[in-house]
Image: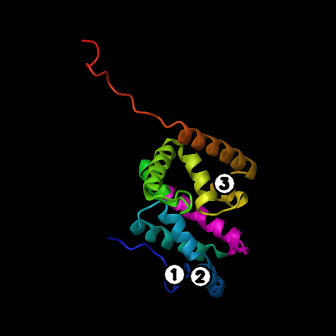
Amino acid sequence: MSTPLTTAPAAAPPPPPPGGPVPDEDRYQALFRATYADLVRFVERRLHPLAAEDVVAEVFVVAWRRLEEVPADHGRARAWLFGVAQRTMLNARRGDARRQALAVRVGTALPADVVPDGSDRVVSQVDLARAWCLLSPSDQEALTLTALDGLSTVEAAQVLGISRTALSLRLVRARRRLRVHLDHPATPKTAPADGGPR
């Protein structure tokens, strides 16, 4: 069984690229300590913890090499790192595997006080997971960035490379679709009991 990354390991920046300028190591160390845990959670919600470790390492290599491009503001720096992680994950693995991993994890994200009884919580998680799978990947990502990753709309728009207005519209539509899927769950179509016409 794998153990998720939970604490920041000793930050050991990669060596500077040959012939390139040497980044500010103190700033890099501070960035690493301030954002590591959030970045790990962001990636682990989308990938298996073993794969997440590689993505997080790659993101910090990019941050080291492009440190002058990382915003000084903590929230914007975090969003910048999430954007690098997003692109790294998309380049590494496209398709349904990422969508399935996200759908499995979203059911556990319900606040503890939403449902007091354990059985009701399981039913709610199953309903949410089913409704979540019916959303498009872009709807899932918009909701995840704002609801689970705690990004503002400006920061989430930066991660996705779209305007704040476009993200706001996407969020309104995604929330509406999720609500419809939760209120009216799709029922599987079954064959007639007699096997249908012969």
Q: Which residue is mark 1?
A: 8
Q: Quadrant of the C terminus?
A: top left
x and y, in percent, of residue 121 in the image: 47, 55
Q: Earlier in the sequence, mark 1 or mark 2?
A: 1
Q: Using the image, determine if residue 144 lies above or below residue 71.
A: above
Q: Earlier in the sequence, mark 2 or mark 3?
A: 2
**Residue numbers of the magenta segment:** 68-91
Residue 150 visible? The answer is yes
Which of the labelled discs sits on residue 33, or is there none?
A: 2
| Residue depicted at 47% across the width and 58% down the height | 117
Instruction: Mark 1 and mark 2 in contact? Answer it, CB < 8 Å.
Output: yes
Q: Which one is closest to the eye, mark 1 or mark 3?
A: 1
Label 2's element?
A: helix
Amino acid tagged 2: Arg
x and y, in percent, of residue 181 in the image: 54, 39
Amino acid tagged 1: Ala
Is 89 within the magenta?
yes
Q: Earlier in the sequence, mark 1 or mark 3?
A: 1
Q: Quadrant of residue 34?
A: bottom right
Q: Using the image, determine if residue 167 lies above or below residue 87.
A: above
9 or 187, which lies in front?
187
Q: Is 27 left, or right, of 12 in this rendering? A: right
Instruction: Mark 2 and mark 3 in contact? Answer it, CB < 8 Å.
Output: no
Pointer 2: residues within 10 angstroms few (<14), some, or many (20+)? some
Which of the labelled discs sits on residue 161, or is there none?
A: 3
Q: Using the image, determine if residue 47 lies above or below residue 7.
A: above
Residue 94 visible? The answer is no
Q: Quadrant of residue 28?
A: bottom right
